[in-house]
Image (cartoon, rainbow, N blue to C red):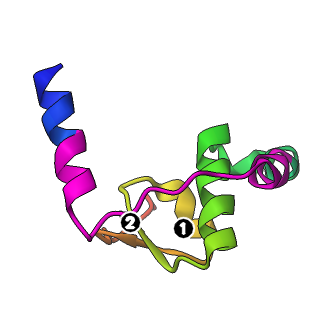
Amino acid sequence: MAHASTFLQTLEERDLYRFESAPELVFLDARESVLEWTDLNASVTDFVVATHVVDLGIDHIATYDRHYDSVDVATLPYVTPPEPNR
């Protein structure tokens, strides 16, 4: 638990990170996206974050999650996807 507390304290003390509360409309829009985009194999959380990022006008987020490639947001660090097997 001490490591988790230190981690959260570090995040709160830095200007690089920003925490935002998601309004109910974000969850409703994300729900519609989950039902519409069934082929992405993304979680409900992925859709909520993606919807909220777009709603806030954020153009980049820190994540290794590939599900955000289908949303108009840059992921940092950017890792080039592996070549498909031929």
In-image side of 21 versus 64 (left or right): right
Most foreground residue, 23 or 69: 23
Dot 1 and dot 2 residues touching (CB under 8 Å): yes
Mark 1, residues whose alpha carbon is within 10 Å: few (<14), some, or many (≥20)? few
In-image side of 18 versus 4 (left or right): right
Visible residue check, residue 61: yes
The stretch drawn in magenta includes residue 4? no
Give the mark nearest the N terminus, 1 or 2: 1
Estimate the spatial distance between the alpha carbons at disc 1 and disc 2, rounded to whole Å: 10 Å
Mark 2: secondary structure: loop
Q: Position of residue 21 (x, y in %)?
A: 58, 51
- Which residue is situated farthest in the top direction here? 1
In-image side of 64 versus 28 (left or right): left
Residue, x 63% and y 44% (percent of image)? 42
User: Label 1 belongs to which residue?
Assistant: 69
Q: Which amino acid lies under the numbered mark 1 shown in the image of this protein?
A: Asp
Q: Which quadrant: the C terminus? A: bottom left
Residues shaded magenta? 8-31
Q: Position of residue 83 (x, y in %)?
A: 38, 66
In the rendered image, the vertical position of residue 20 relative to residue 31, given as above or below: below
The stretch drawn in magenta includes residue 26? yes
Residue, x 61% and y 79% (percent of image)? 57
- In the picture, the disc for residue 81 is 2
Q: Position of residue 63 (x, y in %)?
A: 37, 57
Residue, x 44% and y 56% (percent of image)? 19
Q: Which amino acid lies under the numbered mark 2 shown in the image of this protein?
A: Pro
Most foreground residue, 30 or 6: 6
Mark 1: secondary structure: helix
Count up the numbered dots: 2
Q: Position of residue 25 (x, y in %)?
A: 82, 54
Most foreground residue, 11 or 65: 11
Q: Which quadrant: the N terminus? A: top left
